[in-house]
Image: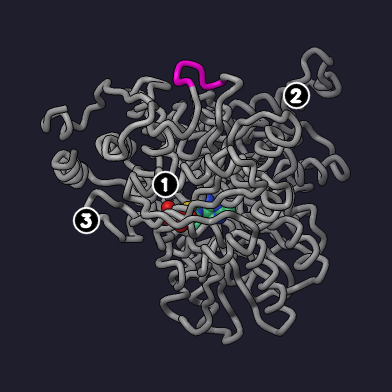
C-alpha cells in the first residue's frame, strides 16, 4: 500500500486558485464572480489571467449567488467565492432555491473554514456550513485535505454538471497528496490500512488522523485512516466496510460535531453496520480569536483528541452490548 | 502629553471626558485614538488599519463631544444611548475610543485579537466588553440591529434614547443595508443616526471599480433620510452633523438622519493615507514607529 509523507505546508485556498486557472484554460465558459475578497480566496488568480471572464459583484453575496444562477441558466459555469460564513450561510436561501432546486450549474468556493482562521475570530470562522449544504438536494459538497486535493477537487467540480461547493481554509496545512493521488467525487480514500479502529476525517483533520494512527501503532493498534473529501455524494461503501472491518470509528473534522462528516458517517453506519463512533470536532460552541495552533489545541482539534477518542471507541466496541451508555454517562455532546 | 509619551509603543493611562467642548479640543483625542490603534495593531500582528484610522475623528466627536450619553463606569446604564459598529472589522477604533473613555483599562488594548481576549478580531458580545452592544463582523447586519434597537426605544418604550450606527461605504453594497434604511424611515425613527464612513476604499480597490454604490447621498435621501454630508476629518463639521441629528430628534421630525462623512482611509499616517491596500493589514514594528512619530507631531 502506498504510504503518505509530509511534503510541506500550504493553504488549501491556493489549490482552489490554481484549479480555477486550470479550468479557465480548458473551458471558455468558466466565469468567476468576485466578492471583494478576491486576493484572500484567490479568485484573483483567475481575474489576472482571464479579466474578461471575471466580474466583481462587490460585497453582495446573496446577489452574487443568484447572479451565478442566472449565468448558469445561460450555459455558463460560474464560480463565486467568498468566506464560507457569507457564501454558504448568508446566501442560504439563494443556494437552496435558485441554485439547488434549479439544478443550476453554480459552483461556490467557501474560504475561511474552521477555527484555524485564527485572529479574525468567531464571526469569520464558519463551522456549520457542511451540515447545511449536505442537506440540500442536488448539491455536491467537497472538503479537500490539502493543497493538491483542493486543486483536483476544484477542477472536478467545474467539470461535473450541477451545483457544487468546495470548502477551503486560510492557514497553511500539511501537504501529503501528489498529482498522482486518486481523487474522485463520491469516493473516500484509504490512506492507511488497519482493522483495529477506523479514523474517518476530512480537511485539515486528515493529517492529524495520520499522526494519531502513528501514535496508536506505537501501542500496537492498527488504525485504518480514511480521507473523505466528498461529503456529498458520500462513499457509503468505504465507510460501511470500515465499520464492518474495524467495529469502531472516530470521525474528525474542523466543524461542529453536529451534522457534518460525523453526521454522514453516523447515518451511514446506523443503517448499514452500527458500531460505536466517537466524534472529534467543535463541540457546540463558536470559535474565537487567537493563533490557529492555540485554537486547534483549545477546541480539541489535534491528533491527541483523535487518539484518545480511538481508545474510547475501541473500548466501547470491546464491551459489546455493555457499550450502551448509562443515561448518566451520556456525554453532553454527541 | 509630551512627544516621547506620544511616540511610545506602550499604552498610557490618559482618559478623556465626554463633556461638550470646542471642536478643536477633539483633535488631540482623535490622535490619541489613532496612536492606540497603531499600538494595538502592531501587537496583534494582524487586523485592520485603514478604516479605523480614517474614522478616528468620527469616534472622537461621538464619544467625547457630548453627543452620545453614556457612563464609562456603567455601560449597562438603562438611559444610555447605544452605538452599533456595523462595520465590525473596524473594531480597533471602537476599542480605542472605549478605552480612552475609561470603559476598561487602556492596557487591555494590547490583547487585541489574542487568545481569550475580550477584544476579539470582530466584536463578540459573548466577551462582555463594556460598550459592545452586539456582535458584528458580517457586513450589513449591524445597521438592522440598530434599527431594531431604535424601534424598541422609540416605538415600544417611548424613551428618548438614541441609537447610532456606523457602516463602511463598501458595506453599502449589501442589499440588507437598504432594507434597514427603508425600515428606519418607514417607522419614522428620528432617534436613529446612521454614519457612513465614506472613504471610497474597500478590499479590492476603489468603490466604483468594485461595485459602484454612488450616489450615496441621493440614495439616502431617496430612502427617506435627512442626509447631511460632512468632512469626516473636521471636528467642527462632524459636530455640525451630530447637532443636526440631535436637533431632528428634539424637534421630532419623524425622519432618521444619515451623516455621510467624507474620510480618507488610513488618515493621519501619510504612508497609509487613501490607500485601499491598508484596509486589512497591521503596521510592521518599523511602520508603527514611523506612524507614531508622525502622529506625535500632531496635537
Ligand atoms: C457579509 C460580509 N461579506 C464580506 C466580508 C469581508 N469583508 C470585511 S471588510 C470588507 C470590506 C468593507 O469595505 P468598507 O465597508 O468600505 O470598509 P473599509 O474598507 O473602508 O474599512 C469585506 C468585504 C464581511 N466581513 N462580511
* Tag 2 subunit: A
Label 2: which secondary element: helix
The label shown at residue A316 is 2
Q: Quadrant of the C terminus of chain A?
A: top right
Query: Label 2 to label 3, Cα distance in Å?
Result: 62 Å
**Mark 1 or mark 3, earlier in chain:** 1
Q: Quick one: which residue is furthest to the bottom in this view?
A: A28
Q: Residue at x 70, y 47 (%)?
A: B188
- The quarter holding residue B205 reads bottom left
Q: Position of residue B171 (x, y in %)?
A: 53, 56
Q: Quick one: which residue is furthest to the front in this view?
A: B251
- Asked if residue B48 is positioned above or below residue A148 in the image, the reply reads above
Q: Position of residue A271 (x, y in %)?
A: 88, 44
Binning the other alpha carbons within 10 Å of mark 1 as few (below 14), some (14 to 19) or many (20 upward) gives some
Q: Is mark 3 within 8 Å of ligand 1?
A: no
Please tell me whether residue B73 belongs to the stretch shown in magenta.
yes
- Asked if residue B219 is positioned above or below residue A50 in the image, the reply reads above
Binning the other alpha carbons within 10 Å of mark 2 as few (below 14), some (14 to 19) or many (20 upward) gives many
Label 3: which secondary element: loop
Q: Residue at x 84, y 18 (%)?
A: A322
Q: Are marks 1 and 3 on the same chain?
A: yes
In this figure, which residue is indicated by the disc labeled 1? B240
Q: Are marks 1 and 3 in contact (CB under 8 Å)?
A: no
In this figure, which residue is indicated by the disc labeled 3? B271
* Tag 3 subunit: B
Amino acid at each position: 500500500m502506498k504510504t503518505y509523507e509530509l511534503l510541506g505546508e500550504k493553504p488549501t485556498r491556493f489549490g482552489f486558485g490554481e484549479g480555477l486557472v486550470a479550468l479557465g484554460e480548458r473551458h471558455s465558459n468558466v466565469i468567476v464572480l468576485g466578492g471583494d475578497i478576491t486576493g484572500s480566496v484567490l479568485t484573483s488568480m483567475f481575474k489576472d489571467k482571464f479579466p474578461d471572464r471575471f466580474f466583481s459583484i462587490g460585497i453582495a453575496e446573496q446577489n452574487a449567488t443568484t447572479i451565478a444562477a442566472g449565468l448558469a441558466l445561460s450555459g455558463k459555469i460560474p464560480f463565486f467565492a467568498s468566506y464560507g460564513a457569507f457564501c454558504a450561510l448568508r446566501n442560504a436561501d439563494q443556494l437552496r432555491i435558485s441554485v439547488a432546486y434549479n439544478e443550476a450549474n453554480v459552483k461556490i468556493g467557501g474560504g475561511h473554514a474552521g477555527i484555524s482562521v485564527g485572529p479574525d475570530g468567531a464571526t469569520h470562522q464558519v463551522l456549520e456550513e457542511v451540515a447545511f449544504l449536505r442537506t440540500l438536494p442536488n448539491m455536491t459538497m467537497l472538503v479537500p485535505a490539502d493543497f493538491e486535493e483542493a486543486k483536483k477537487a476544484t477542477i472536478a467540480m467545474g467539470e461535473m454538471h450541477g451545483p457544487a461547493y468546495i470548502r477551503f481554509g486560510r492557514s497553511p496545512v500539511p501537504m501529503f497528496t501528489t498529482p498522482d493521488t486518486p481523487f474522485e467525487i463520491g469516493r473516500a480514500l484509504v490512506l492507511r490500512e488497519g482493522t483495529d479502529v477506523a479514523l474517518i476525517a476530512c480537511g485539515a483533520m486528515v493529517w492529524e488522523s495520520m499522526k494519531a494512527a502513528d501514535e496508536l501503532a506505537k501501542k500496537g493498534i492498527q488504525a485504518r485512516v480514511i480521507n473523505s473529501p466528498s461529503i456529498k455524494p458520500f462513499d457509503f461503501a468505504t465507510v460501511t466496510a470500515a465499520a464492518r472491518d474495524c467495529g469502531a470509528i472516530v470521525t474528525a473534522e474542523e466543524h461542529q460535531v453536529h451534522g457534518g462528516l460525523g453526521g454522514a458517517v453516523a447515518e451511514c453506519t446506523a443503517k448499514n453496520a452500527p458500531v460505536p463512533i466517537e466524534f472529534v470536532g467543535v463541540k457546540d460552541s463558536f470559535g474565537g480569536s487567537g493563533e490557529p495552533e492555540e485554537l486547534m489545541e483549545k477546541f480539541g482539534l489535534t491528533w491527541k483528541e483523535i487518539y484518545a477518542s480511538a481508545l474510547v471507541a475501541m473500548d466501547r466496541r470491546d464491551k459489546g452490548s455493555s457499550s450502551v451508555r448509562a443515561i448518566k454517562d451520556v456525554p453532553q455532546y454527541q | 502629553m509630551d512627544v516621547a509619551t506620544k511616540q511610545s509603543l506602550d499604552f498610557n493611562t490618559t482618559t478623556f471626558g465626554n463633556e461638550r467642548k470646542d471642536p478643536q479640543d477633539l483633535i488631540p483625542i482623535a490622535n490619541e485614538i489613532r496612536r492606540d490603534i497603531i499600538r494595538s495593531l502592531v501587537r496583534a500582528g494582524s487586523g485592520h488599519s485603514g478604516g479605523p484610522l480614517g474614522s478616528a475623528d468620527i469616534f472622537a466627536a461621538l464619544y467625547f463631544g457630548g453627543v452620545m450619553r453614556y457612563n464609562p463606569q456603567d455601560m449597562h446604564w438603562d438611559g444610555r444611548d447605544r452605538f452599533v459598529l456595523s462595520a465590525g472589522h473596524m473594531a480597533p477604533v471602537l476599542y480605542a475610543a472605549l478605552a480612552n473613555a475609561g470603559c476598561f483599562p487602556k492596557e487591555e488594548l494590547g490583547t487585541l485579537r489574542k487568545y481569550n481576549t475580550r477584544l476579539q478580531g470582530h466584536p463578540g458580545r459573548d466577551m462582555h466588553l463594556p460598550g459592545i452592544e452586539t456582535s458584528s463582523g458580517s457586513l450589513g447586519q449591524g445597521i438592522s440591529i440598530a434599527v431594531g434597537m431604535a424601534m424598541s426605544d422609540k416605538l415600544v418604550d417611548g424613551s428618548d434614547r438614541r441609537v447610532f450606527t456606523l457602516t463602511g461605504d463598501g458595506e453599502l453594497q449589501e442589499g440588507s443595508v437598504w432594507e434597514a434604511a427603508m425600515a428606519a424611515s418607514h417607522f419614522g425613527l428620528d432617534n436613529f443616526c446612521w454614519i457612513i464612513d465614506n472613504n471610497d476604499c474597500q478590499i479590492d480597490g476603489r468603490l466604483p471599480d468594485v461595485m459602484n454604490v454612488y450616489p450615496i447621498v441621493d440614495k439616502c435621501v431617496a430612502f427617506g433620510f435627512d442626509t447631511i454630508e460632512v468632512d469626516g476629518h473636521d471636528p467642527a463639521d462632524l459636530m455640525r452633523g451630530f447637532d443636526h441629528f440631535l436637533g431632528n430628534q428634539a424637534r421630532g421630525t419623524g425622519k432618521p438622519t444619515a451623516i455621510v462623512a467624507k474620510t480618507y482611509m488610513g488618515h493621519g499616517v501619510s504612508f497609509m493615507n487613501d490607500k485601499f491596500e491598508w484596509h486589512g493589514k497591521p503596521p510592521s514594528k518599523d511602520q508603527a514607529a514611523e506612524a507614531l512619530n508622525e502622529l506625535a507631531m500632531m496635537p
